[in-house]
């Protein structure tokens, strides 16, 4: 190790650190993309079960290799660019929809400090930055461009309407989402996601999780994340009966698949964010000193529950009407989020920060 | 004019959340219930004599088909799927098809050929699967269309039963060459017996 | 490294800003502006202001530009019969009509802005030198906190800050004028 490092003009520690970063980031990114692939299967399986069906079960055992088959199909299908489309933007849009979701995963702390080969490699996150939540919200708000541009560049009325609806909806719900998150930020006194998670994990008592202090904020964030990821019951961007498929009507093959990788990655990020903010992140109940891999497993388990919830809700609820969506967003969610923030602020002012006796 | 009075929603219903929770609990419970999907290739559909699958030419027990290439099925076919070239034969029926093709890609399984056939030569089988690697392979010739009468018996009897409702005279014996095997017309077993044979008519007690 | 990155991003931001006014397609204008915002955010990051960078993207790129795009798509702006009208609006018109008041206001703004920048330049440089360590290292180090930012903005840089707000107001008024000019048949 040291010899190789010397040849590269580095010290052994530097090389080790560099390798650790490479391995960690690769693992996380590939993991997220695979979450998207697996989620397509989970979605089809769960929806089938809820409708007394089996779901895909031909490719591999229990249909486990279905995403692989789909991927091969997507890659070999023909990309059709509609007449009159704005070609550069048309090709750029899927990337702009998927990249923000991938970028936001960088600040999610998956586990506490990783101790491997007798060395502490730091927390399992690509970047442990101080403005984690702000970064996540800022980059996350970029994903709306992909949808808008896809709608506009396709030169199709269905797509345009889908894109416009999506943008209006995402702007409306982003406000309530940010306000809901702010309540937690006020409680934790930090916008560093790792610190927020550590605050809840320190004693191992599940009652320390912010869900039990901010149940309303948790619920608001859940609803807002359905809207932000364009999922049922708020999937106006792609509602089939009215808009054929909304903003992705004119897309085919891998371009189309990238939209879905983006959607599922965004779901994974929102789930992970909710887990960090409200469910203690990597905290294992009643085990304050759990090793990092247990914490990682706990984190993944919690995220899985959230992802299942996304699918579960999608196959249960009917779609809202667009005016209902706007009414809920502006007349219910926003006042509730504001009240929640106000109440949190008042409690903090009266009784001081939590944890302080 | 009809005035529809909408039900006033109670506060609980307007909150959405309890109702949503109820819906979620229903879908969750349904996840573990018995699936009703039929795993098709492994669990084939039940087939009865009513199943109207692809048309087939019935092979009598003497190894011949009853077709005299009259062309009625060809004319009846709404999809123009049947092509027949007739020719002479030494058999008592004097005419037989030299070529009998059904384009399975055109066939719509309507069963008109079965109804049109005056000689009980073509029947709808219970075969439903139709897949191959080229269009040419799906144009079935006579050899591909032949099926032994034993395999088609139920369908033949069913069609006879249905048609006999409108028949005033007794049904003439079918499958004239092989009545011995058929069971209910043993005396008319000579080859070339005619449809109007009085013996055969007497053997149809339920007709008329 | 950090310096090279700064010059690269600065050059890109200038190019993007030029694109905002030079592209004919309104959607391309908006996207150039978006890119310019990202370049600005990167510059903030290089200077160690993580909070400012995140806010820049969140507020401008994430919210305001989406509204812009929204409006542009709804209006379906195409180079139509009003386009030549728009082209005449500019310096020539500015000089020809009602020039008295506008020139005075513009001159006042220019003087105010320049004096504000000049007046605070020395202290700004000192503040910059006082900042512990800049460049890429600063991204992982303590960021310019929101508290410090507020102190600077409403304390030392109050005058430039207000000058910029006046500039924004002037822009808003100008936009109203242009928008009214483009549809003479309505008046």
Image (cartoon, helix red, strand yellow):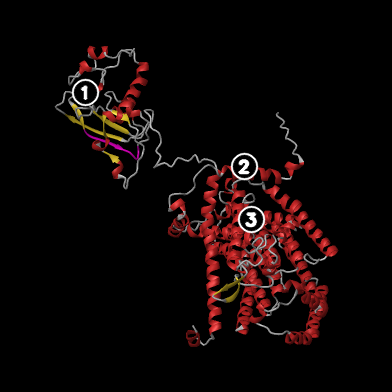
Tell me which segment is drawn in magenta. B98-106
The secondary structure type at the circle numbered 1 is: helix
Q: Nearer the viewer, mark 1 or mark 3?
A: 1
At 36% from the left edge and 37% from the top edge, which residue is drawn? B128
Q: On the image, numbered disc 2 is attached to which residue?
A: B26
Q: Which disc number belongs to residue A166?
A: 3
Residue C92 against residue C72 in the figure, above or below: below
Residue A48 against residue A29 in the figure, above or below: above
Q: Is residue C8 left or right of residue C119?
A: left
Q: Are marks 1 and 2 in contact (CB under 8 Å)?
A: no
Q: Is residue B20 magenta?
A: no
Q: Is residue A279 left or right of residue C149?
A: left
At 54% from the left edge and 51% from the top edge, which residue is drawn? A43
Whole-percent x and y of residue B117? 29, 25
Q: Is residue C95 left or right of residue A108?
A: right
Residue A59 against residue C57 in the figure, above or below: above
Q: Which disc number belongs to residue B178?
A: 1
Q: Is residue B102 magenta?
A: yes
Res. C78 visible in picture:
no
Q: Residues within 10 Å of mark 3 (few under 14, many from 20)?
A: many
Whole-percent x and y of residue C134? 68, 83
Which picture quadrant has residue C119? bottom right
Res. B197 visible in picture:
yes
> Which chain letter matches label 2?
B
Cα separation, mark 1 vs mark 2, equals 62 Å
């Amino acid at each position: 190790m040291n010899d190789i490092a010397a040849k590269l003009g580095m010290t052994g520690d530097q090389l080790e650190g560099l390798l650790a970063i490479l391995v960690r980031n690769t693992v996380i990114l590939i993991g997220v993309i695979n979450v998207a692939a697996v989620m397509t299967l989970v979605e089809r399986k769960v929806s089938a079960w809820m409708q007394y069906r089996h779901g895909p079960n031909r490719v591999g055992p229990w249909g486990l290799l279905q995403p692989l088959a789909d991927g091969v199909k997507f890659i070999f299908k023909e990309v059709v660019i509609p007449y009159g489309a704005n070609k550069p933007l048309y090709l750029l849009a899927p990337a702009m929809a998927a990249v923000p979701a991938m970028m936001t995963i960088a600040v999610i702390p998956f586990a506490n400090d990783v101790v491997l080969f007798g060395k502490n490699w730091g927390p399992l996150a690509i970047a442990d930055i101080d403005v984690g939540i702000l970064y996540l919200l800022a980059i996350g708000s970029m994903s709306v461009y992909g949808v808008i541009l896809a709608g506009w560049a396709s030169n199709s009325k269905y797509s345009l309407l889908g894109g416009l609806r999506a943008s209006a909806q995402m702007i409306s719900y982003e406000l309530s989402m940010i306000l809901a998150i702010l309540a937690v930020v006020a409680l934790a006194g930090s916008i560093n996601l790792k610190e927020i998670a550590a605050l809840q994990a320190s004693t191992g008592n599940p009652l320390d999780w912010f869900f039990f202090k901010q149940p309303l904020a948790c619920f608001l964030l859940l609803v807002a994340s359905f809207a932000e990821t364009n999922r049922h019951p708020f999937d106006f961007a792609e509602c089939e009966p009215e808009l054929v498929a909304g903003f992705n009507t004119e897309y085919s093959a891998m371009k189309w698949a990238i939209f879905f990788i983006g959607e599922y990655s965004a779901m994974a990020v929102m789930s992970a964010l909710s887990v960090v903010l409200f469910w203690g992140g990597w905290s294992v109940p009643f085990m304050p000193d759990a090793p990092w891999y247990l914490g990682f497993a706990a984190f993944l388990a919690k995220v899985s529950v959230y992802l299942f919830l996304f699918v579960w809700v999608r196959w249960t609820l009917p779609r809202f009407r667009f005016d209902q969506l706007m009414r809920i967003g502006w007349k219910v969610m926003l006042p509730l989020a504001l009240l929640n923030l106000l109440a949190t602020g008042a409690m903090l002012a009266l009784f001081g920060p939590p944890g302080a006796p | 004019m009809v005035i529809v009075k909408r039900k006033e929603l109670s506060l609980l219903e307007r909150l959405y959340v309890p109702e949503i929770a109820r819906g979620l609990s229903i879908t969750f419970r349904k996840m573990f219930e018995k699936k009703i999907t039929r795993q098709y290739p492994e669990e084939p559909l039940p087939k009865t004599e009513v199943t109207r699958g692809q048309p087939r030419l019935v092979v009598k027990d003497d190894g011949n088909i009853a077709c005299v290439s009259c062309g009625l099925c060809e004319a009846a076919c709404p999809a123009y799927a049947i092509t027949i070239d007739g020719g002479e034969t030494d058999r008592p029926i004097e005419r037989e098809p030299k070529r009998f093709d059904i384009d399975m890609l055109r066939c719509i399984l309507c069963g008109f050929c079965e109804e049109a056939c005056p000689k009980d030569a073509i029947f709808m089988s219970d075969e439903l699967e139709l897949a191959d690697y080229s269009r040419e392979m799906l144009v079935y010739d006579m050899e591909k269309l032949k099926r032994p009468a034993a395999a088609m018996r139920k369908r033949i009897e069913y069609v006879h039963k249905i048609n006999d409702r409108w028949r005033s005279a007794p049904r003439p014996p079918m499958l004239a060459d092989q009545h011995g095997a058929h069971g209910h017309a043993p005396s008319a077993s000579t080859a070339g017996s005619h449809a109007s044979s009085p013996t055969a008519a007497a053997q149809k007690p339920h007709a008329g | 490294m950090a310096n090279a990155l700064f010059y690269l991003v600065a050059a890109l931001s200038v190019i993007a800003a030029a694109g905002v006014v030079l592209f004919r397609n309104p959607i391309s204008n908006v996207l150039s502006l978006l890119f310019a915002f990202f370049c600005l955010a990167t510059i903030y990051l290089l200077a160690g202001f993580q909070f400012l960078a995140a806010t820049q993207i969140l507020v401008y790129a994430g919210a305001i530009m989406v509204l812009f795009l929204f409006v542009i798509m709804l209006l379906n702006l195409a180079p139509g019969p009003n386009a030549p009208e728009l082209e005449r609006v500019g310096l020539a018109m500015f000089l020809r009509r009602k020039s008295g008041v506008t020139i005075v206001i513009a001159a006042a703004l220019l003087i105010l802005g320049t004096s504000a920048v000049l007046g605070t330049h020395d202290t700004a440089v000192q503040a910059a030198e006082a900042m512990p360590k800049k460049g890429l290292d600063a991204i992982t180090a303590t960021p310019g906190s929101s508290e410090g930012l507020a102190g600077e903005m409403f304390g030392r840089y109050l005058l430039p800050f207000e000058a910029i707000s006046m500039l924004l107001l002037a822009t808003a008024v100008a936009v109203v004028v242009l928008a009214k000019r483009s549809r003479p048949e309505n008046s």
